[in-house]
Amino acid sequence: MKVERHSKIVELISKYEIDTQEELAEYLKQAGFNVTQATVSRDIRELRLTKVQSENGKQRYTVLHAQGEFNDKYIRILRDGFLSMDMAQNILVIKTVSGMAMAVAAALDAIHFQEIVGCIAGDDTILCAVRSVDDTILVMEKIHKLVAG
C-alpha cells in the first residue's frame, strides 16, 4: 500500500500545484487512500519532497533530484546514444546507436521521468511503457529538449 501511495503522491504533485500537507492529504483521500497528516508528513520525508516556487509565485511540492555530474552523466549517455523516437499510443519506441539501447534505457530510468512506467531495451531499440498518450507526447518533448541541449 505504501508503494502505491508514494506513486500516487508523485503523480499528484506532478499534475497539481500542491503546497500543503493538508491539500496533499485531501487529494490522496479523493484517490481512495485513507491517510492522516502524520502519514503524509512521513511520506513527504521518505520521498524527499521539497517545495519550489512555481511560475505563478506559489510554492509547490516537487521531488528533490540530485543535481550536477550525476544527472549530466545520464544526459550525456542519452545524447550519445539517441538516434530517433516514435510513438504507438502510450508506447515510446526509441532507436539508438547499435549496442547503446541498454545504456540509454538505464539513463532514462536514472533521469526519473515520472510519466515512464518502465523500459525494455534490446541492442538498438528501447520500448518505454508510458502512462498515457498525452504523457508520451510530453516525454518526447522532454527528450527532444535534453538531446538538443
Image: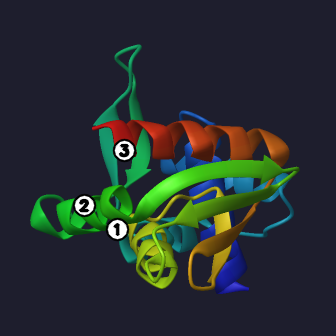
For the residues labelled 1 and 3, the Cα–Cα distance comes to: 24 Å
**Circle nearer the viewer, 2 or 1:** 2
Q: Which residue is mark 2?
A: 76
- Identity of the residue furthest to the front in this view: 98
Name the residue at 54% across, 33% down: 17
For the residues labelled 2 and 1, the Cα–Cα distance comes to: 25 Å
Q: Secondary structure at mark 3?
A: helix
Q: Secondary structure at mark 1?
A: loop
- Identity of the residue furthest to the left in this view: 69
Q: Is residue 19 visible?
A: no
Amino acid at pointer 1: Arg
Amino acid at pointer 3: Leu
Q: Is residue 31 above or below residue 121?
A: above
Nearer the observer, 93 or 112: 93
Q: Return the x and y of residue 74 as percentages of the image width and height.
A: 29, 67
Q: Earlier in the sequence, mark 2 or mark 3?
A: 2
Q: Is residue 149 left or right of residue 102?
A: left
For the residues labelled 2 and 3, the Cα–Cα distance comes to: 9 Å
Q: Earlier in the sequence, mark 2 or mark 1?
A: 1
Can you tell which mark lies on residue 133?
none
Name the residue at 83% across, 57% down: 31
Name the residue at 74% across, 86% down: 1
Q: Which residue is mark 1?
A: 48
Choose top left, top right, bottom left or bottom right for residue 66: bottom left
Q: Which residue is mark 3?
A: 146
Q: Secondary structure at mark 2?
A: helix
Name the residue at 46% across, 65% down: 112
Q: Is residue 136 left or right of residue 36?
A: right
